[in-house]
Amino acid sequence: MRIKNLIGATVLDVSANEVGKITDVDFDKEDGKINSIIVSLRKNMLNTDEIEVDYADIKTIGKFVLLSTDIAKDEETETVEVEVE
């Protein structure tokens, strides 16, 4: 898979809840391996938050990117917590 195919891909957490879309990919220039992905969490049309997800937290990459973690969003404080299992 090419990196350009990852940009814009839908990201799902381990519970298959939609987390957001990939906006950027960090990779090692030496060996070409992905280090992490940047996921945009859409709050509303004008405001987004981004989180960085380590490659080790990605379960599968296909039509969707499935994480091996839960992404819990706190509605009141608008913060995002990544729970690693």
Image: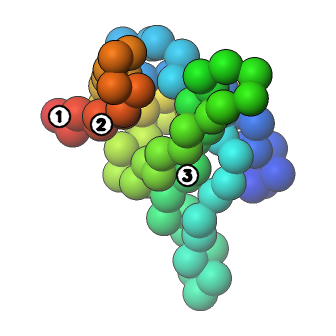
Based on the displayed image, in which of its 4 quarters is residue 32 positioned?
bottom right
Between 29 and 31, the one nearer to me in the picture: 29
Say which residue label 2 marks: 82
The reply, left or right, for residue 2 in relation to residue 65 is right
**Marks 3 and 2: in contact by CB < 8 Å?**
no
Q: Residues within 10 Å of mark 2 (few under 14, many from 20)?
A: some
Point out the image quarter for the C terminus: top left
Q: Is residue 14 visible?
A: no
Say which residue label 3 marks: 37
Q: Residue visible at 82% across and 51% down?
A: 4
- x and y percent of residue 3 in the render? 75, 55
Say which residue label 1 marks: 85
Q: Amino acid at mark 3?
A: Ile
Looking at this view, name the residue that lies furthest to the bottom.
Answer: 30
Q: Residue visible at 34% across and 25% down?
A: 77
Which element type, helix, strand or loop, lies under badge 3?
strand
The reply, left or right, for residue 14 in relation to residue 6 is left
Q: Is residue 34 visible?
A: yes
Nearer the camera: disc 2 or disc 3: 2
Q: Earlier in the sequence, mark 2 or mark 3?
A: 3
Count of number-bearing discs? 3
- x and y percent of residue 55 in the render? 43, 53
The reply, left or right, for residue 7 in relation to residue 58 is right
